[in-house]
Image (spheres, rainbow, N blue to C red):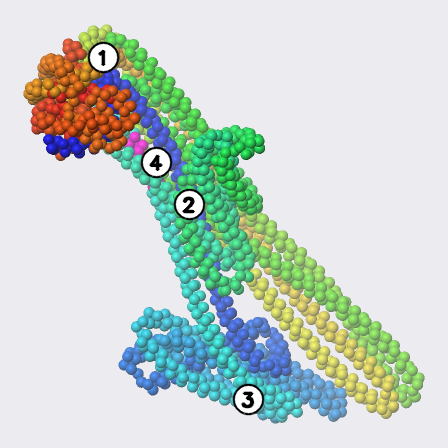
Amino acid sequence: MASWLGGLGQSLGQVGGSLSSLTGQISSFTKDILLEGTEEVGDAATELHVSNSRLREIESINAAQKFENERLKKVCSDLEEKHEAAELQIKQISIEYRNQLQQKEVEISHLKARQNALQEQLQKVQSAAQSAQSGAAVLPPTTTSASYVPVVRHSSGFEGDDMDFGDIIWSQQEINRLSNDVSRLESEVDHWKQIALSSKVQGTNDAEQSEICKLQNIVKELKQKLSQEIDEHQHELSVLQDAHRQKLVEISRRHREELSEYEERIEELENQLQQGGVSADAMDDSKISEQKKNAQSLEGGKVEGLQVVKDLEDEIRKLNHELSSAKEENKVLLKEQELAKVEKIQITQEYENLKSDFSMLQNSVAKQDALLKEQEKKLQSKTSLPEDVVRLQQALLEAENEIARLSSLNQGLEKELTRAQHKNENILSVSTEDQNSELSQLREDLERKEHELNESIAERETLIAELEELDKQNQEATQHMITLKEQLSKQHTESDSIIKQLKFDIDFERKKVSELETEKMETIKELDSQKEKLSQCSYTLNDLHISKQQLQDNIKDLQEQLRKAQDCNLHNKKEIGELQQRLKEREEELSLSLGKLTEKSNQESNNTCQDLILKEREAEIAKLRNDISESKQLNQDLEKSLSDVRTENGKLVTAIEELKQELSDAISEKNKVYLEKDTVTEALKMEKRQIESELNQTEKRLLEQAHKYKQTIEELSNARSMDTTALQLEHERLVKLNQEKDFKIAELQRSIEQMEIDHQETKEMLTTSLGGQKQLTELIKEKEVFIEKFKNEALQVKQELEEYMKVSKKQDVLKQNLEEKDRSLAVMKEENNHLKEEIERLKDQQSRSMPVVEPKTLDIIIELESEVTQLKMIKSNLEEEIEVHKKTIEEQNQTTVQLQQSLQEQRKEIDESKFQCEQMNVTHERLSLEKDEEIKNLQKTIEQIKTQLHKERQIIQTDSSDLFQETKVQTLNGENGNEKHDLSKAEIERLVKGIKEREMEIKLLNEKNVSLSQQIDQLSKDEVGKLSRIIQEKDLEIQALNARVSSASYRQDVLCLQQQLQAYVVEREQVLAVLSEKTRENSQLKTEYRNIMDMVAAKEAALVRLQEENQKLSNRSENSSQDMSRETIQNLSRIIREKDIEIDALSQKCQTLLTVLQTSTMGTGSGSGGVNSNQFEKLLQERDKLKQQVKKMEEWKQQVITTVQNMQHESAHLQEELHKLQAQISVESDSNSKLQVDYNGLIQSYEENEKRLKSFSQELAQVQHSIGQLHNTKDLILSKLDLVSPPVAAASTVSQLSGIQGSAPEVLSDESKLLQKELEQLKQKLQEKDSTILTLQENNQRLSDSVATASEIERKNQEGTESEMRQIKEKHDILQKSLREKDILIKSKSDQLLSVSENLTNKENENELLKQAVTNLKERILVLEMDIRKLKEENEKIVARCREKETEFRALQETNMQFSMMLKEKEFESHSMKEKALAFEKLLKEKEQGKTGELNQLLNEVKSMQEKAVTFQQERDQVMVALKQKQMESSALQSEIQHLREKEQRLNQELERLRSHLLEMEDSYTREALAAEDREVKLRKKVLVLEEKLVSSSTAVENASHQASLQVESLQEQLNLVSKQRDETVLQLTISQDQVKQYALSLANLQMVLEQFQQEEKAMYSAELKKHQKQAAEWRKKAENLEEKVVSLQESLEEANAALDAASRLTEQLDVKEEQIEELKKEGEIRREMLEDVQNKLMNLMNSTEGKVDKLLMRNLFVGHFHTPKNKRPEVLRLMGSILGIKKEELDQLLSEDQRGVTRWVTGWLGGGAGSKSVPSTPLRPTHQNIFNSSFSELFVKFLETESCPSLPPPKLSVHDMKPLGAAGASKTSSTPSNSQMQDSAVSGTSRRPDTNPFLAPRSAAVPLITPASSSGHLLMKPISDALPTFTPLPVSPDASAGAVLKDLLKQ
């Protein structure tokens, strides 16, 4: 009792959930029982219907899957094409990026070199500035006086020098820098010397000895390196010295020439003086003048010497200045270079070398002093001679040589210094690793080095002292020079004052040294800061390099990933293709195996071996299905991998674009070279095109968005008029739409921002490419800024990468959304118009009733308006951006027009090819459609006649399947062909129409099938016998045919054909291999050709540049010649005018002189007349001479004018020739361009031929495929002929019998399996078996009748069979004919193979020709390259010659001018001397005579005439010089013309050669084109022949199909049996329907009885309990008997399973079952009697115990009410009310009014009644706690069974009616035994009920709760848990109690 109460307490918590679903379960259960009745009765009909419906479903699924497969194939093909396109694009992009990378690397190297050069220049400028500052400080006052001399010296001495002034400045800066380095090195050497001395003094530690050993080893290595470097430096020095010597030799030669000229002039003057007989005074004067000149020249030399000395002093001061700075730098270096001990010994060696150099310098200084002393002595000894001047100049030259040598030494020292610095840096890098270990030692070293510093300072002081001594020596040398000057002349006072000033300056400088030292300290600090900055810059540079390397690595990784992805894609493609092929093969195998299976399942049910074959086939099918599933999974995986690869490609593309942006940013600042500019512009053009395409897309999207936004606005305006609820819904929807569109807008903005960035980058590229040269100077300053920018950009790039990753994911989602939006667009457009009208209406309404608007709508409107304004703002921004982009697009459109023209030409070709392909496709599709129709007709007819004709159907089906395969292949080939060309909309529509037509045909065929089935039904039974006779006769004929076919000769033919087929397959494979090789070669040739074209383009660009340079040079030469000619003409005209004026003046003077002479003669006496006449004669003679000279000058002037005119004519001719040459060059360039165009055309024709070849190869492959298919069909026909086996005469009848008998054991085997689960299923199956046995017996009887009738009909129909025999023979003949035709086809295919091989050979020849053409082109390119090189070299030579000629012209002009000036001076001097002599004589005479005035006048006039003559001579000299220049220019121009003519000849020769080559190429190409056309014609003819053959074969197939249809019509007679069986099944159906109606009536009766029972149960319950227990014990015994019977039944069932094949056992088992059924019927009758007794007793009990309630039941319900959850409590109350007899309406009122009132009333009414002790407790089991809903359903079923038993009439039941009786009996007997017995009975009786029946336990009942997972079937049929509230039963029989409870529940 306690355990039972505990179980009740646990279970009451679970009651509520089950009570709520009770009513629904009961109603559904009744429906299920009704349905079960129908299912049990009409099994055959329902199974037919179900199977038909399933077949239809499967067919529809199959069609859908086929459609899906086709769609997926198309998608795959599209994806493959896209993938290939993407791969090509990626390859192109990668190639472009590689080229760009190479260019950028070149640019980087250029920039690095430029940067190094700039840094060196900076250093030089800084050093120059320092030196300039020091120089300015040294020479403030004296430069003005002393600087004129060296300039004069340069002008006189270095006239022919090519050295520029900038070069001189640079050399001076170099000398200064080298001197600084020398001083610094000297200071370092002194310092290290001191350190070495101090270290020797201090002594070495043990630890230092090891270091010393190491250092010594290092020193040895360094010595070796030093020796090598010294050798190199010596070599360089020797080269420099040679160059300097050559310059000095030239200068000395010029000086000597000048000196010799001076000496010659002096000698001439002396001779003239001797001839003239001048007095001693004049000689003295001339000598004095000469001496003065010599003195002046010597003074100039002296000043030069002084200047050199001053320069040396300045250099020494600079050395001092830089010594101190170097020492302070040394201190800094000592701090930084703590491990510089290694270089001690090396630097000591360097110090020794410097010492030797210093000693050399001292020696040179001593030599200079000695030379100066010698010069002084020579000057003292020989003041009058010019040889001293020469010696002084030589001494100066030697001094300059020494200076040059010192500078070269300084350079060597500088290089050694740089090396030492490099070594120091290396040591520093090594030291950083060992710093931590050596810190303590370094601190000690620091202290030592401080001590050494002090010593170095002391050394510095000594060096300063030495320098002061050097200064003193220099001062002494200057003093010597001053004394020399005093001895030479009295004018040395000025030089003394200069020396005093110099001394003062030296003192001033010494004062300034201290100030400079302080400044140097500051500069050192600044240097430190600069060094730190430099180190930072170096670090940043390193970081930049590292980042660049990382970027390069990233690029490489990305490229590798790309390659891997491409490989994966290729691999995936291959795998997909293989899988598709496998799928096709498996599908074909499946179809074949399924056909065979169906045939063999119908045909071979007798033999066990055939069962095994069936099992194997099933296993194969399972394997195939597994393979198909695996292949589908693989396809899915491959698709996933494809999508992944695409995403990776997208990522890589984005990464590459980012890298491109970075690279373009980095490189745009460094673009200087024009070639690189061209590449950049090309890249920009490509990017602009991409931007244009993206812009177009964005514009389209924006337009779509604008439309959508308009629609949304209109919808929102509509929403105002709608209700608030509708408004809210629409508002939410619109908000969602707005959000989606906001996302889209954000994406578009991002894309536009990217576009803007790209646009800005392009603009920056262009601007930076123009302003790159200016920015070069600013690059050094901007480095640090760039580094920071790059770091920021790297971070931004990372962020952008992450954003792009997110965006790419979003884009995928948005693409799907876009597709959906596109669909909705059409609908939205339709709604748009309505919405516009409504908007207008709403506007009117708003204007009228604005204040009436609701607040909600107002808010919504405000929000929408704000959104609209935002959208308008965005739209306006976007429109502005679009306008900006449109401008760029308009600029680009001009370039696209040209491309479109070329595209149109290509499109024409593509259209032609498409037209051909479409024609082919149309023919293929026509054939495929016809064959599909035929195949479908055949398949439909064959499927109907499957069960009767197995062997004939094999032949027909295989033929049809082969044909279907052929058509499939053809359609597939067609599809492949279509896929290669883009599927247009028209083609898609055409395909849709074809599909619709096929669907219509399928419907027609279905209707035909229905009509055929009706015709078959109409055929009578007599025709079946005829058909069986015919079948037997046909079998005999087939055997005979097989015997014929299996003859040896036929098999040999078959073998021969198979061998031929194999040979053809091998040949085909070889041909395909050769074709693949040829295509590879073609691709290689194409790539080579493209490379060659690129080379040719580059060469042409170079040619164009050279031509431009030539034009520039020619223009320059023309301009220069024209300018020169103009200048000469102007000069000549000016000279002529001046001379005319002078001639007029002279004539006037002559007239005046004549008048004066006449007057003088008149005035003077006779004595003086002789003299005057003599003088006058002389004057007249001089006048005549002058006139003659004037005439000569005029003649010469005319000659000059004529020569000038000739020169002008020549220049005009030259210009004309130049123009002609330029025209010829342009013609040649035009011809070159024409050649290129022709070549491009030839290449296009070649590509077209290749395309045609590919199309022919495809056609060939199709032909070969059709051959293979024909062979396959032939083999299949042969195999089928072999397979045909002779059946026995009575095979049909036996098969039918065996089928009938075999179906029963199959059903029994199913039954045995189900019996282990349930008893009820067993009973159902038994009933079914009874019905099937009856039907089988009837069938057997009918068959026996039909056999009897058939034997009679056979005799009558022998004549008919003979005619059919003849038909079969005719079929055999037709088959043989078809075989022959196929042999002919095979022969034709072999001919085609031969033709294809010939085509292959032709293509090989074409390839060879193309290769030759390529080699010819390569040779031509090489020739062009050679010519270009020659032209370049010639240009360079011409430029060099021009420069040399210009320099020569200048030099010649200068020399000519100098010579003319010298000559004029000499002539002038000689004339002046002569005139002076004459004047002196005349003066003497005049003194004697006393008439001086007139002579003086005459002399003045003579002087003026002489001066004019001198000017005339000067002008003549100038004109001569100009003439010479013109002659030189004309010769140069003539040489250039000759050069150009030679070039012309060469180019003409090349042109002729190229023309001939082109003609040859054109001839060859025309021949090839003609040959290709001939081949095309042949191939087309062959294709036509093949098509005719195909048509003939199709006609043959049609004949065969026609014969097959005739056979089908003859075979339709056999379908009579099927129609009879169908009629019988229809009769059975009607019987079963009648039974169903009876069951429905019995159910209604049952429900009525149930209601009565529920009323009677309450009264009868308590009194009849004891009697019921006794009856229960009796029933248990009966149940045990039944269990034994069940065991026997199970045994018999096992025997039935074991002996399925044997029919005899079946009959015995059926007899046993019938006996058992009779026994069960008897038991059922007994139970009915018992039930009637119980009902009578229950009625009595109901009358006696009406209104009594069990306390325990009420208490349990009361407790259960509180244990149940609150939401389920009303259901418990209803149950209690139903037990108490309260009506449903009253209960509902009570519950609705107040649930608490009901509970109080119930509790008050129940009181506290304790349960009666008589109620037994059912103990809980742990195994049964989770098993629910068993007892309730079981009770209900048993109750129904007991109630339904009496209503049915017993004679009609037979097998069908035994199930409910058995069930009832089982329920009666199994109520009262113990738990163990109950378990046994449950196991043996039913598999659904392992638990006891607590509902029928005495005085207890259970309520169903939860549906368990283990149970299967209806909810009521599931088990109930024991842990549930049980009700106290009344003393009534168990049936009565259960019925009453159920009745109450059903009422509720």
Quarter the C terminus occupies: top left
Quarter the N terminus occupies: top left
Q: How crowded is mark 2: few (under 14 residues within 10 Å), some or many (20 or more)?
A: some
Vertical arrangement, residue 1526 with respect to residue 560, above or below = below
Query: In the image, is 1798 to the left or to the right of 315?
Result: left
- Rounded to the nearest whole Å, what is the CA distance between mark 3 and mark 1? 154 Å
> Which residue: 63% across, 80% down?
144
Q: Mark 1 points at which residue?
A: 1641
- Rounded to the nearest whole Å, what is the CA distance between mark 1 and mark 4? 79 Å
Q: Give the range drawn in magenta.
A: 572-587
Question: Do the residues under discs 4 and 2 have CB atoms within 8 angstroms?
Answer: no
Which circle marks residue 475 in the picture?
3
- Rounded to the nearest whole Å, what is the CA distance between mark 2 and mark 1? 71 Å
- Rounded to the nearest whole Å, what is the CA distance between mark 2 and mark 3? 84 Å
Determine if residue 1861 is in view. Answer: no
> Which residue: 30% across, 33% down?
583
Query: Amino acid type of disc 1?
Result: Leu
- Rounded to the nearest whole Å, what is the CA distance between mark 4 and mark 2? 51 Å
Query: Which of the two labelled residues, at mark 2 and mark 3, occupies the earlier sequence position?
Result: 3
Query: Which of the two labelled residues, at mark 1 and mark 4, occupies the earlier sequence position?
Result: 4
Query: Which of the two labelled residues, at mark 4 and mark 2, occupies the earlier sequence position?
Result: 2
Tag 3, which secondary structure? helix
Q: Mark 4 points at which residue?
A: 1068
Q: Which of marks 4 and 2 is in front?
A: 2
Q: Mark 2 points at which residue?
A: 807
